[in-house]
Amino acid sequence: MRTAGRDVVVIAASAGGVEPLRTMLSELPGDLPASVMVVLHVSPRGTSVLANILDRAGPLKAAPAEDQEQTQYGRVYVAQPDHHLLLHEGRTRLSRGPQHNGHRPAADPLFMSAALDAGPRVSAVVLSGTLDDGAKGCEAVRRQGGAIAVQDVAECAFPGMPAAALAAVPNAVSLPARGLAHWITAQTRTPVTAEERVDDDGTEWEVAQVLRHAPIMDDPNGQLLGLTCPQCNGPLFEQHSDRISRYVCRVGHAWSHDSMIEAQSDAVEQALWVAIQRLEERVRMLERMLEQAGERGQRNTWARYHEEANRTREALRTIRGLQSRIGNDGDNLLSS
């Protein structure tokens, strides 16, 4: 079945992505024959002013997405804080399902749900941002016949997300923000043919988990690893695709390579701070016991506590050094 053109546009951005978003929307026509869905990584707390910013950027009406809205042409649907935005049966869906790549909202659930719902009618765009959220989603869009474009990495304040998308889909188009707007418009005028669905690679289960339509699975289409999810400590499964691998736990938390490394670094740092706090408390307790043993003339007890206090101080110095090194090494690894 042929359709008039790609009438579903999904856009993802993170750090440094607001300005190119505004630029893109300022160049899109008011009669765009497509609906636009936008995810920006934002804090889960408080409110977002992104919809107001984008509403003033150009002729398209932008507003925070509501659950179960029938999508309309010429409208921009903006993900709300702490809610994934998805497309399901032609309607917007909001969900507080499992985080993806440490984010909610995240790019991958939106892109994957759109790929499943609209197939070749999808145009996906990845703008400036750190790490690699959106790469798996771009691959899902490609598998279902959609088109992918990314912001030119030379123009990006943070090129991580566009670079990861290009690694996952090497034939994706790379353009500056204004060029991306014209590319989107051209895609809406490019007739596409609905093809048969390709074999599922786990995308359906992940989208169903975000929508909370699927039960916890013993084997979420992957190889069981000797690793645990940084978020829920459940067992992790590695999923392989054409160019990328990712990690999924039984409840649906999903991690790309870079987001997994960062999440593990955060978990280790948190554990080290807990250890530092406990060791400092132990030093204070031993010092108190030392004072009391000295007052009572308990020489052997005083010597034992003194030796233990020295060992604890040495452990404290070691862990403080590790905490500092892990933070720096993690930053260096992710920027390399």
Image: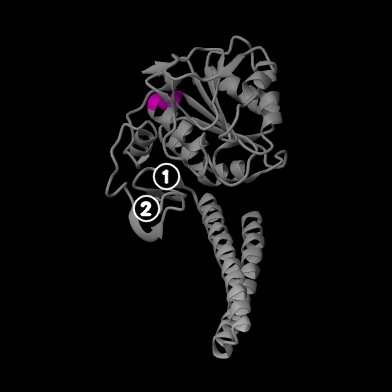
What residue is shown with label 1? 253
Q: Residue at x 55, y 57 (%)?
A: 270
- Residue 62 x %, y %: 60, 16
Q: Secondary structure at mark 1?
A: loop
Q: Residue furthest bottom?
A: 300
The quarter of the rendered structure image containing the C terminus is: bottom right
Pick the front one: 124 or 95: 95
- Residue 248 x %, y %: 39, 48
- Residue 206 x %, y %: 37, 38
Local packing at callout 2 (Cα closer than 10 Å; few below 14, some 14-19, many 20+) is some
Pick the front one: 19 or 81: 81
Mark 1 and 2 residues: CB-CB less than 8 Å, in contact? yes
Pick the front one: 129 or 166: 129
Residue type beneath disc 1: His
CA gap between label 1 and label 2 equals 9 Å
- Check residue 119 for magenta coloring: yes
Instruction: Look at the image and give the residue range highlighted in magenta.
Output: 117-121
Instruction: State left or right for residue 103 relative to residue 98.
Output: right
Instruction: In the rendered view, tell whether residue 44 sits above or below residue 270.
Output: above
Q: Residue at x 69, y 16 (%)?
A: 56
Q: Residue furthest top?
A: 31
**How many marks can you see?**
2
Pick the front one: 244 or 193: 244
- Check residue 166 for magenta coloring: no
Instruction: State left or right for residue 54 relative to residue 226.
Output: right
Q: Main secondary structure of the magenta part?
A: helix
The quarter of the rendered structure image containing the N terminus is: top left
- Residue 116 x %, y %: 38, 29
What residue is shown with label 2? 234
Instruction: In the rendered view, tell whether residue 59 sits above or below residue 21.
Output: above
Q: Residue at x 58, y 60 (%)?
A: 273
Residue type beneath disc 2: Gly
